[in-house]
Image (tube, rainbow, N blue to C red):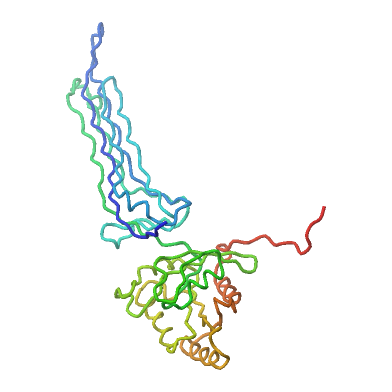
Amino acid sequence: MKFLDLCKVYIRSGSGGGGAVSFRREKFIEYGGPDGGDGGGGGSVWAEAVDGLNTLIDFRYQQHFFAENGRPGMGQQRTGKTGDDIVLKVPVGTEILDEDEETVIADLATLGDRVELARGGNGGWGNLHFKTSTNQAPRRANPGQPGVERTLWLRLKLIADAGLLGLPNAGKSTFLAATSNARPKIADYPFTTLHPNLGVVGVDNAEFVIADIPGLIAGAHEGRGIGDRFLGHVERCSVLLHLVDGTSETIAEDYQTIIGELEAYGGHLADKPRVTALNKIDALDDDQQAEAMAELQEACGGPVLAMSGVARHGVTEVLRALKAEIAEDRLRQLPVEDEEPWHP
């Protein structure tokens, strides 16, 4: 399935039905009087976060959503039928933006969240509503209110507990493949990952979700490379894992490049808890590893973990460091296996 995290939709709520101008005329009934019914209300447009979706690809093929109009009123005080609502089913974590692509109308971050995007027009009054003691035969009725037409943007931000950051070929996809059942594309050239990937990892009888996004390069906030458009997928994460290639000749510069892009992106992304890890230590001897660790520790000013996604060295320690930064209510606890198997 193709991943799509930004799309434009056109919506319109239903117009209300017009009221009816009608008079009661029956045989042997001396006094008829007005009996025009009201028009039915127009249908509304809603958005709802549902389970089982992780992309907005459905909105690539259908972008126009129009709710049903209300039916007009009829004689004998009959009210017109109310138009049916229409519901846009979106993945959990979808933001709904106004046409300017900046103003946030709603953030559907929880399963079952529902918001009304365009309310249907009210139905018009029939002439029965205008009957008075001085005007007992009104010949006027209200038209229904028109529907609301809007152009909106849908932007998906994946719901993950931890996010992976790093330059292209820093080993993010390899780490995700080594720790989860996810199978992202892995190759020896930059920008192998073109779309975000999610994987569920487990450590110490607990599971959490990790998001892998395409690598960043210097100037990504200005549109270089793939840009920073995928950083939105790690905005909701509790902790970020910053992977640095241990085989690089500019380790400190690589680290500062990512930090600079986070700060340029804005928001609170640069202030999130981070775990820094030196990756690909299987390609280094002891002296090279010690030198690389010292350089990275000096650059980040904090502790650094050593790991290898290919050889799976130090992976468990990294997962434990990530787990420690995630709130307990976001972790999925696994059942503890009995030490001795049960026998009948």
Residue furthest top in the image: 28
Residue in the picture at 55% in, 91% down: 290
The answer to whether residue 249 is left or right of residue 15 is: right
Residue furthest front in the image: 188
Question: Observer-nearest residue: 338 or 134?
Answer: 338
Total numbered circles: 0
Residue furthest right in the image: 344
Query: Residue 249: x and y, percent?
Result: 44, 89
The answer to whether residue 305 is left or right of residue 270 is: right
- Vertical side of 296 occupied by 39: above or below: above
Quadrant, the N terminus: bottom left
Residue in the picture at 27% in, 34% down: 123
The answer to whether residue 250 is left or right of residue 44 is: right
Query: Residue 83: x and y, percent?
Result: 32, 35
Query: Residue 78: x and y, percent?
Result: 30, 23
Query: Residue 189: x and y, percent?
Result: 41, 76
- Vertical side of 286 occupied by 19: above or below: above
- Vertical side of 302 occupied by 163: above or below: above
Q: Quadrant of residue 235?
A: bottom left
Question: Observer-nearest residue: 36 or 234?
Answer: 234
Q: Quadrant of residue 33?
A: top left
- Vertical side of 110 occupied by 273: above or below: below
